[in-house]
Amino acid sequence: MTRTFMDWGLSYEWAWGLATIAGILLIALPLMLAVAMIIYVDRKVWAAMALRRGPNVVGPFGLLQSFADGLKVFLQETIIPSAANKGLFLIAPIITFTVALAAWAVVPFNSGAVLADINIGLLYILAISSLGVYGVVISGWASNSKYPFFSAMRAAAQMISYEVSIGFILVCVVLYAGTFNMNGIIEAQRGHGLGIVNAYAFNLLLFPIWVMFLISSLAETARAPFDLTEAESELVAGYQTEYSSMSFALFWLGEYANVLLMCALNAILFFGGWLPPLDWAPLYLVPGWIWLFAKIFAFFFIFSWVKATVPRYRYDQLMRLGWKVFLPLSLLFVVLVSGWLMVTRYERSPHTALCPSLDNAELAARGAAPQGSPCVRENLT
Amino acid sequence: MVDLSQYLPILIFLGIALALSTAFVFLPMGVSQLTGTHNPTTEKLSEYECGFPAFEDPRSRFDVRFYLVAILFIVFDLEAAFLFPWAVSLDLTGWPGWITMMVFLFELVVGFVYAWKKGALEWE
């Protein structure tokens, strides 16, 4: 995009700056639009599974329901409880929303279509999504009310518990891909299964990992059946109880942006991201971002489906699942995956040879790289 | 040498996201002042407790069972932090690196089993 702006007669710095800001707006604004629509989809799916109609009044098929809600919320009064810590009370939704947006900076939407193509993309997402817990904890504490406080305590324990197993799960993916770069991980999945399926989930060793990741991502974003932080039957609305107006809406926007991010991560890490499902030439005619969005949408449907059908966990069951099932299992799989890779992939290759850092051009050409080079990832299924 | 310029878009993104969310929080306040919906009363500003007046201060003593979870989290997240650089360089470190990491993981598993046996993971 920088080149387009340079063609307009701008110097490189200005063109770069304009392109970056345009890219940011191209991510942030459609993301907010997507969040509004995905809330509508969530309600529609949920309603359909309960044999209800769902929102159907505002606009055709109720499509504008989220925007009507947004406008209503925008015009409402912002209530700041007199007992609350005012500064922290207002900072909490800002943190939640900022962090939820910023995580999208490294998500690749197509080959090369990524705002910041950093080498440690996955690590960045892990780091920035663990900052999300601050918004919840601060809001619970600053509200100075009992329900938000309990909810914040629960949220902190729940999020950090599942972050541990998510960390180990990501290690398994990184072991296979050999890179933290998001585009690199996607490219490593090209033809991974039987030389034709572009997905890590097709691998017998990685499929159980993906199942764990899907469940952990439900828990990490506090979606049903792990929505104990806002269990309305016990905690009213959890940490959002004292919030109103746009500050309340920011929690919702941030939460759904995080859900979308987790769907995107499922698609990118295990289902080939913007690659078509099969490594078959006609499928590449469809632009990559359409494949990515289709996969994200499919995962979001699974999230809604789970929300509509699975009853909520009890808190001790939630902690047991995180610490006593997922943590030992994901640790075991780190050992299994790394051992398997050592035996099958790295034993024969001269592992002392340094791999050149893989940039995009090389990644694109990797399918044609000579066999036996230490940087060629073989297909193992 | 790390090329820091590729992190600049992230910094700009953070700035824009911060500005956006700050605007979202403070704009409705101004709007509600203008439209006249801003009408605070004592009852409205009191904390929510199902219609009752609050029984006691929410900042009273609270048994933080999550303390132990947080300690365990630090141990295991640190372990994951050690695993990440090893995972990307598995082809470079070879068998010595793999065996070293397995020894490290084994020690951690011993600690994990100990915590389990001690009941640190029990939730009553």
Image: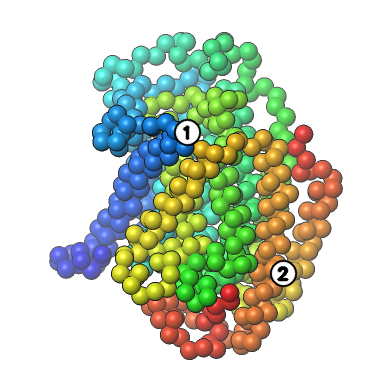
Identify the amino acid type marked 1. Ala
Measured along the vertical axis of the image, is residue A119 above or below residue A230? below
Q: Nearest the camera: A25 or A64?
A: A64
Q: Quadrant of residue A37?
A: top left
Quadrant into which the C terminus of chain B falls? top right
Who's the residue at 74% across and 72% down the image?
A: B100
| Image location (x, y in percent) of residue B66 | 69, 38
| Image location (x, y in percent) of residue A380 | 58, 76
Q: Which residue is mark 1?
A: A50
Residue situated furthest left in the rendering: A9
- The answer to whether residue A321 is left or right of residue A81 is right
In this rendering, the label closer to the viewer, 2 or 1:
1
| Image location (x, y in percent) of residue A296 | 43, 53
- The answer to whether residue A79 is left or right of residue A129 is left
Measured along the vertical axis of the image, is residue A352 above or below residue A211? below
Who's the residue at 40% across and 77% down the image?
A: A364
Q: Which residue is mark 2?
A: B101
Identify the amino acid type marked 2. Met
Q: How much space separates mark 2 and mark 1, taking CA atoms?
A: 50 Å
Q: Nearest the camera: A329 or B60?
A: A329
Q: Quadrant of residue A54?
A: top left
